[in-house]
Amino acid sequence: MTFVRNDSKVFHFCRSKCHRNFKMKRNPRKVAWTKAYRRAHGKDLTEDSTFEFERRRNRPEKYNRVTVQKSVQAMKKVLDIRKARADRHWDNRMAGKKKSDTAEARKVLENEIHLVKAPPAQLAEDPEGYMEKLKVKVAAPQSMESMEE
Amino acid sequence: MINLGTYLDVRENSGAKKLQCIKVLNKSKKKAASIGDSIIVSICQKIIKKKSKIKSKTATAVIVNVKKTVKKKNGNLIRSGKNTAILVNNQKAPLATRILGFVPYEVKLQGYSKLISIANKCI
């Protein structure tokens, strides 16, 4: 589907989902599943030298059998390099993911232990530690001078 | 879907501003004109200029954009926000010297290749 706006700007839509979202006047940079969002938020690889090969050139090239063969070979090579770089980008992005996930899971286990182990059982096992947990810290009372201010 | 009486905008610098369709040419089986079809128009509004190329009140024009979605031969669908046309003479050459925006490929198939050479883009 191609849409031509009144200022003669051309929009190409890959599927009707995108077209419908355009009609709703949604900003693609704010919708999480779009390519524009992923690029804007650093999810995908951007600003790479491999992207510069793919360009629309308005000048027609003269046919030459050798250059065609060479360019076909180069296309495969460029694609491989781009894929490797994208994979590396993903790896870098996900570097601290496992550590933070385990830390979060441990925190949840500590805070919501009553779901795993019933409170009476915890009390029987470690009475001192359990009672310490129940204590609530109260903030120090403010001085009268500060209150007046 | 351009019929008798449809108002059209102009997307070039010939001097016309608003057109009205008064006749659809080469109409045999189809009911209404679409992209690439030629029509006869009356010129309703002009841009005020001393040296205007348009002297008569009527002219022939080629339709470039239509609001109704049109299926192209390669399977693409195309639609635009306005109904627009370009004024041409009997030799299928444009009256204007500059065309704004692109010209669809269907126009070229009808023999208006001079339009394509002036326009900066062809889809």
Image (cartoon, grey):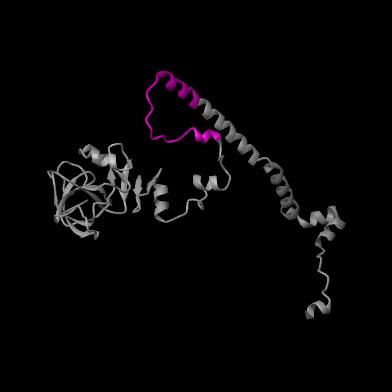
Percent position of residue A29, x then y: 50, 51
Q: Name the foreground residue: A52 vs B89.
A: B89
Percent position of residue A73, x then y: 48, 22
Q: Which stretch appears magenta?
A: A49-75
Quarter placement of the C terminus of chain A: bottom right
Instruction: Say whether residue A68 is magenta.
Output: yes
Total marks shown come to 0
A58 vs B90: above or below: above
Percent position of residue B84, x then y: 26, 52
- Farthest top residue in view: A66
For the question of whether residue A116 can be seen, the reply is: no
Residue at (41, 34) in percent of width and height = A57
Instruction: Say whether residue B55 is magenta.
Output: no
Residue at (84, 55) in percent of width and height = A124
Residue at (33, 42) in percent of width and height = B120
A120 vs B72: above or below: below
Q: Name the foreground residue: B105 vs A33.
A: B105
A113 on left or right of A90: right
Q: Name the foreground residue: B60 vs A81.
A: B60
B82 on left or right of A11: left
A128 vs A11: above or below: below
Q: Name the foreground residue: A121 vs A73.
A: A73
- Farthest right residue in view: A128
Residue A26, by quadrant, is bottom left
Residue A86, by quadrant, is top right
A83 on left or right of A103: left
- Farthest front residue in view: B50
For the question of whether residue B53 can be seen, the reply is: yes
Quarter placement of the N terminus of chain A: top left
Percent position of residue B98, x then y: 29, 47
